[in-house]
Amino acid sequence: MIETQINEIKELLSTPQNIVIVPHKNPDGDAMGSTLGLYHYLKKYNHDATVVAPNDYPDFLKWLPGDDTVKVYESDIETCDALITKADLLFTLDFNAFHRTGEMASILENSEAIKIMIDHHQQPDDYATYTYSDVSMSSTCEMVYNFIEMLNDTDKIDTDIASCLYTGIMTDTGSFRFPSTTSRTHEVVSQLMRKGASNAQIHNNVFDTNSYSRLQLLGRAMQNLKVIPELQTTYITLSQEELDQFNFKKGDTEGFVNYGLSLKGIIFAAIFIENKQDNIIKISLRSKGSFSVNQFSRTHFNGGGHDNAAGGRSETSLEETVEKFISILPQYKDELSATQKGQ
């Protein structure tokens, strides 16, 4: 963001406003960490701020400070529509196209509020009055820290804000091991710890709260893992029947795709999860090196994201989706081989 835009936003925030803060559908740690971190910051200036999530999010994020204030759109459409309609400012965090909010897309598009986007995904839509977009960033939470810093307000960061932002940075960097983790990322994390973020406790809250059924589901996912060695690719399938068998709850499959990517010699990993309620196959893709799963997903599976982490969807059956995936892979043989050699 340029200085004139920052000054304009400062002016907008100089008096109390009605503000709605929105993450993407199926919000993850970065989405909820960034929205709640920004929420706590805005409340310090007596803004009437509310986080409106398109749908519910995993239990391992329900400990985040401010969780009890979050409105869930699919559970209370009338209230949420009213909040969005009367909003003066609308912050959209961790997404850059309204369709990423599912059923909220229409009312967000039609909102007369001044829109501010903070996001690190590729190819943003041009809907915001103010856009802070940077694909090189580790996470939207790191960008929210930078945003507060641009406003010369890091002294306002307290334990609640720091804990929210640390959570999103930790989860979106794979506990600081992904290539998007930079020296600046560690500098920001250091500042957040000084402000009160407890790294050990946050890690425990997010990663060390497995249920027995989730570990059973992980075991089934590992049984279903398939390897295509000549294409340096793995994939996992989970049917609705298997999810139901192990009492699936939202967030239970988080990180499963990374197990495939951890195999020696693997460049590309995918997981296909059947969702009978939405009548889709949810797809998560991960890669190493220069192989872009963002481009792969945009081209073939109505999705997108980052070069090394993306999502997509299919409206055909689980079997047909996997067959399509396998049939497409040979087109990328040279690219995958070249990426492996460059590792």
Image (cartoon, rainbow, N blue to C red):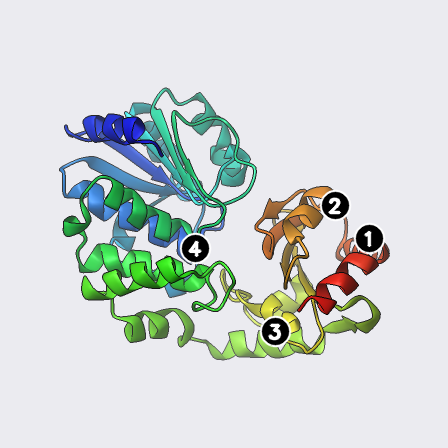
Labels 3, 1: front one: 3
Mark 4 vs 3: CB contact within 8 A = no
Report the mark closest to the observer, 2 or 1: 2
Mark 4 surroundings: few (<14), some (14-19) or many (≥20) residues within 10 A: many
The reply to whether discs 2 and 1 touch (Cβ–Cβ < 8 Å) is yes
- What residue sits right under mark 1 in the picture? 324
Q: CA distance from mark 2 to mark 3?
A: 23 Å
The tag earlier along the polypeptide, 4 or 3, is 4
Q: Earlier in the sequence, mark 2 or mark 3?
A: 3
**Badge 4 element:** loop
| Foreground disc of the pair 4, 2 | 2
Count the labels in the image: 4
* Measured Cα–Cα span from mark 4 to mark 2: 27 Å
| Whole-number angstrom distance, CA of label 4 to CA of label 3 | 22 Å
Question: Can you say which quadrant of the picture contains the C terminus?
Answer: bottom right
Tag 1, which secondary structure?
helix
Q: Position of residue 332 (x, y in %)?
A: 80, 55
Residue 300 is marked as 2
Q: Which residue is mark 3?
A: 259
Amino acid carrying label 4: it is Tyr
The image quarter in which residue 326 lies: bottom right
Front position among marks 4 and 3: 3
Horizontal side, residue 290 vs residue 327: left or right: left
Circle 2 SS class:
helix
